């Protein structure tokens, strides 16, 4: 376990020395590159923030532990893009994303429509948009709205519901599926 953690940390240090940031900014969607097999003792997410153009591929859990540096990178990517406020994303949500993306075989990049929402942003959206809950789990870092380009949205909805890990909402007009780690419910 210590060797794996040491390897992960030294890889992160090497990447920073070489100038490879943990979060890359891109004006367009990055193509899904082949992903090496994920070890059974690892959990991974591949995310692209549709509002900021940032993308991230990271192992956030290995050898029975969450990796704090990876969680920080994920929190930053999933920040409220309207005011740049960052909050902790519930690790259960990340585990859910890993389980869902594994159903597609290659951990495809999930496009994030909405991650964390500050109370100010959520209040504004609640007033101006249908379907935004006044006490949204987005404000607690327990919800995310995503799609997987090139994949059927209805299938993503079905795969998410099969996890029975929380709420799942289907928004075909807006092209995303809402997932949260609150109580199990579907809409």
Image (cartoon, helix red, strand yellow):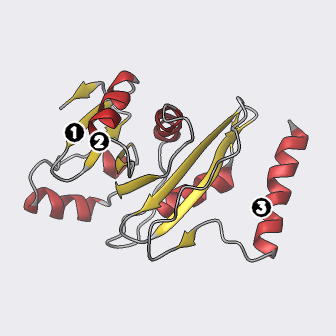
Quadrant location of the N terminus? Answer: top right
Determine the image quadrant of residue 105: top right
Residue 114 visible in the displayed image: no
Going from the N terminus, do you reach mark 1 or mark 3 first? 3
The residue sitting at 54% across, 55% down in the picture is 32
Q: Which residue is mark 1?
A: 170
Tell me if mark 1 has few (under 14), some (14-19) or many (20+) residues whose alpha carbon lies within 10 angstroms of its own: some
Tell me if mark 2 has few (under 14), some (14-19) or many (20+) residues whose alpha carbon lies within 10 angstroms of its own: some
Q: Identify the mark at residue 12; answer none if there is no mark.
A: 3
- C-alpha separation, residue under disc 2 versus residue under disc 1: 8 Å
Q: Please provide percent x and percent y for residue 30.
A: 51, 65
Quadrant location of the C terminus? Answer: top left
Going from the N terminus, do you reach mark 2 or mark 3 first? 3
- C-alpha separation, residue under disc 1 versus residue under disc 3: 37 Å
Image depth: mark 1 or mark 3 in front: 1
Secondary element at image label 2: helix
Label 2 with label 1: CB-CB less than 8 Å: yes
């Amino acid at each position: 376990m210590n060797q794996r953690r040491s390897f992960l940390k030294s890889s992160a240090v090497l990447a920073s020395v070489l100038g490879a940031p943990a979060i890359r900014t891109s004006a367009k969607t990055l193509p899904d590159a082949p992903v090496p097999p994920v070890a059974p003792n690892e959990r991974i997410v591949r995310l692209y923030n549709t509002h900021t153009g940032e993308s991230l591929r990271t192992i956030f859990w290995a050898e029975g532990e969450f990796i704090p540096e990876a969680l920080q990178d994920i929190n930053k990517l999933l920040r409220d893009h309207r005011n740049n406020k960052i909050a902790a994303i519930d690790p259960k949500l990340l585990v859910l994303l890993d389980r869902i993306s594994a159903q597609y075989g290659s951990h495809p990049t999930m496009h994030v429509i909405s991650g964390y929402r500050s109370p100010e942003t959520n209040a504004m959206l609640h007033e101006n948009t249908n379907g935004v809950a006044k006490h949204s789990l987005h404000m607690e870092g327990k919800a995310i709205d995503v799609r997987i380009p090139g994949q059927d949205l209805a299938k993503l909805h079905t795969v998410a519901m099969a996890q029975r890990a929380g709420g799942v909402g289907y928004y075909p007009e807006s092209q995303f599926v809402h997932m949260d780690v609150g109580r199990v419910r579907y809409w």
